Amino acid sequence: MSTALRVEGLTKRFAGVAANDDVDFDLRPGEIHCLFGENGAGKSTLSSCIFGFYRPDKGQIFVRDQPVHIASPIDAIRHGIGMVHQHFVLVPEFTVLENIIVGTQRSGWRLNAAEARQKLKAICDGYGLDIDFDAYVWELPVGRQQWVEILKALYLDAEILILDEPTAVLTPAESRILFDIMGKMCARGLSIILITHKLIEVMQSNRVTVLRKGKVVATLNTVETSPDELARLMVGRDVSFAITKPELKPGETVVAVKGLTAHGHWGEAVLKDVSFSVARHEILGIAGVAGNGQKELFEVLCGVRKPQAGSIRLMDEEIAGLTPRCLMDRGVGHIPDDRFREGLVPEFNVAENLVLGWQRNAKYRSGPLINFKAIAKLSREMIAEYQIATRDEKVTAGKLSGGNAQKIIIAREFRHAAGLMLANQPTRGLDVGVIEYVQSQLLRKRAEGFAVILASEELGDLFGLADRIAVMFKGEIMGIVDPRNTTISEVGVMMAGRRQGTTQ
Amino acid sequence: MIRFEPRTERDGLWTAASFAMAVVAGLAVSALLLASTGADVGQVFAALVQGAAGSPKALATTLVKATPIILTGLATVIAFRAQLWSIGQEGQVFAGAMGGYLGGQVLAGMPPLLFFPGVLAFGMAAGMALGWLAAQLRNRFGVNEIISTVMLNYLVIYLLSWLLQGGPWGENGATISYQQSPMLPEDAFLPALFGSNRLHAGVLLPFLAAALCAVVISRTPLGYEIRGLGYNPEALRHKGVNIARTVTIVMMASGALAALAGATELFGVAHRLRADNLVGLGYAGIIVGMIGGLRPLGTVVAGLFFGGLASGAVYMRVLGDVPASLVPAIQGITLFFFLCAGVLARYRVVRVAFQ
């Protein structure tokens, strides 16, 4: 057996546009093979064809060198192909065991839980996975939920595993564990197709196939290539990773937070006595592992969550507890981390999304009616200025890639905000080219005199962009450091819960 | 072999074709049903068409029958577009009739130019009150609007029943108690149009209301918020829209539209307060709104179609000799195929070769 899976000349068109154009791809037994490319390069289309969601217009798929016809995911599973989606397909109210066996039973109506438990136990022991089969899925952290998805595929005897951007929802620590597990799986003969656009992950694979605009640009042995070469292949031009940040003297204080405390749904403290201030011409970075209060901090700052105690002064006005509307009117811009849920109405078109929140503004109205003409004109200007890749302003926002969706949000917030810009994970899940763009835009706002609060899980980004970095752990600030005289590992230790200046 | 694939963009021609197929299929299945009762299918359909649109009188009846269900259909559209699944149209129709009746007593003797707008406003206020109540239950206590509106329907329907039987509004002096109020004075009848004896001025209201709904939904900031609320309330909340307030406005507007149907039935058709001619108008409106694709103009078309079916039913029964209860069956069959067409319009049919 020379290949676990091979794809020859695969072509898939959508409305005449080739999402995959004559793609050749092969997966060797026991390797991790990365599919690397920008959003919309055709990675997901290719994996969807392999897993039977789409049927290719042309081309042939071989499993273990035998030509196969995969008409549906059921066929794919029968051929030993498993897929773990970026967004999990789990029932939160079911236990781990129930999630795995429901819908995967092969023998009629009877749920044979005992037998399934035994089989799963064997799989878990083999890979060193420690998971409670009787825990409810909603109780599990995201990383463990992903294990459940992987177990589901392994339970169905998958020998070829497709992982679609598996680390998009994971913390750095969880990602490391995932890669350990993947290594063990390959050692036992499984073959893995890893879809990603993070260079750091590509470098941990055996081989990489770079896609651009639906075509295979290159298939390389990972050890023989470099991140720079891969980025160039992906984008089709040179990309600069170095961020050049001009020295600016911080101006007057824009926002001052003191003793901010907020409770979660069950009354637990999600923010504890948080204090900091940000001045004009300054970017305050917020570092921390996901789920340590960053999201709640942004929610309080933009008004969708009410704080229990503490004060927020914006230009010497107390704003704690005001509604999002009041804060928007006072010049607070917000780029939320969940862009399609909190930042956009995916069913609205680009133009409508560019005025979301400002639909009642006199500039966009004529009398009681919305002035769609004025909005269209403005939208075309903004599409050009922010380089949003869309046919025109009438395209539904949900059809755009994550990067272009993010550009819509940035364009809207930059247009309407004055003074304070909140950006929570603005580069998460984006392509290298777009990340570069978003970062340059944040620096532009800093130069214009905005105070910027930027949370990111990529420490490298924070060190490049922020003037000061506040490290959060379990809703508290462990310390605020100057990136010029602090190392990444010092911040890493604070992210794990050690206070600044203490040794324990 | 053929196969269905989701469409990335809507195709107007294909959508029209889907609905045309739905009409044909609906008629074909209805024909089978009619044939199974031993009726002459051709004759029955001829009677149906004649009764729906065969004469000015038939057209007038169609319009009169379509009026309340277009209004309740619009009530459905405005709520469902915001993904507020109000089933309260039925009760709101009753409330509209009751509010109108109360208004008729309060405003008795006023000049017509004040009286008719006044009683319609009374009726709409009653429907708005019900919508407001359901909205408050949802906003404050998280009560699902489906549950609250269904429960309120019972409440309102039994309230009318009590008011008419044993209550203050029943017809006095009769040895047998009918569930109805005394006849309204003749100057409280909605004026007739074109000298017809059945075409009341209220038939203009659904068209005005539909035009207003269309403009509000697609061209005003409120409509933008209603559509946005239906698609993604979380994004709206983050961008400063007061969700609770929008929900309240939508539920009140929906209630007002449904109530208007009850009030026009009272002053334009029944001329006395009774339950039997109001039953089912709210639920029919849900069907009409859905078939209309939750669009105001589509709802007008669907409402006229159903109005025609209702009007033609009389002829069908007389000329075609079929039981009138087949009409709701035909309506149900049509709805089924229209819903299918709605799904079909979102897919494309692809021919695939056997491999």
Image (spheres, helix red, strand yellow):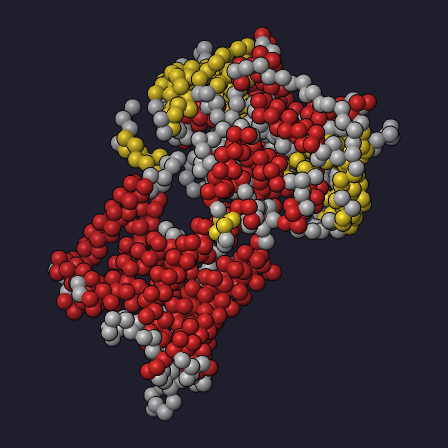
- Residue B348 falls in image quadrant: top left
B94 w.r.t. A396: above or below:
below
Residue B28 relative to residue A214: left or right: left
Residue A309 or residue A365, whichever sits in front: A365
User: Which residue corresponds to the image point at 45% horizontal and 65% vertical from the top-left?
Assistant: B256
Q: Position of residue B134 (x, y in %)?
A: 52, 63
Residue A132 or residue B40, whichever sits in front: B40
**Can residue B110 be seen in this snapshot?**
yes
Residue A7 or residue A446, whichever sits in front: A446
Instruction: Look at the image and tell me in which quarter the C terminus of chain B lies.
Output: top left
Q: Position of residue A131 (x, y in %)?
A: 63, 34
User: Which residue corresponds to the image point at 57% horizontal and 22% vertical from the top-left?
Assistant: A433
User: Which residue corresponds to the image point at 76% horizontal and 27% vertical from the top-left?
Assistant: A248
Residue B68 relative to residue A190: left or right: left
Residue B315 or residue A439, whichever sits in front: A439
Q: Position of residue A465 (x, y in %)?
A: 71, 26
- Residue A328 falls in image quadrant: top right
**Can residue A61 be seen in this snapshot?**
no
User: Which residue corresponds to the image point at 34% horizontal and 82% vertical from the top-left?
Assistant: B187
Number of labels in the image equals 0
Q: Position of residue A6 (x, y in %)?
A: 43, 16
A431 w.r.t. B200: above or below:
above
Instruction: Look at the image and tell me in which quarter the N terminus of chain B lies.
Output: top left
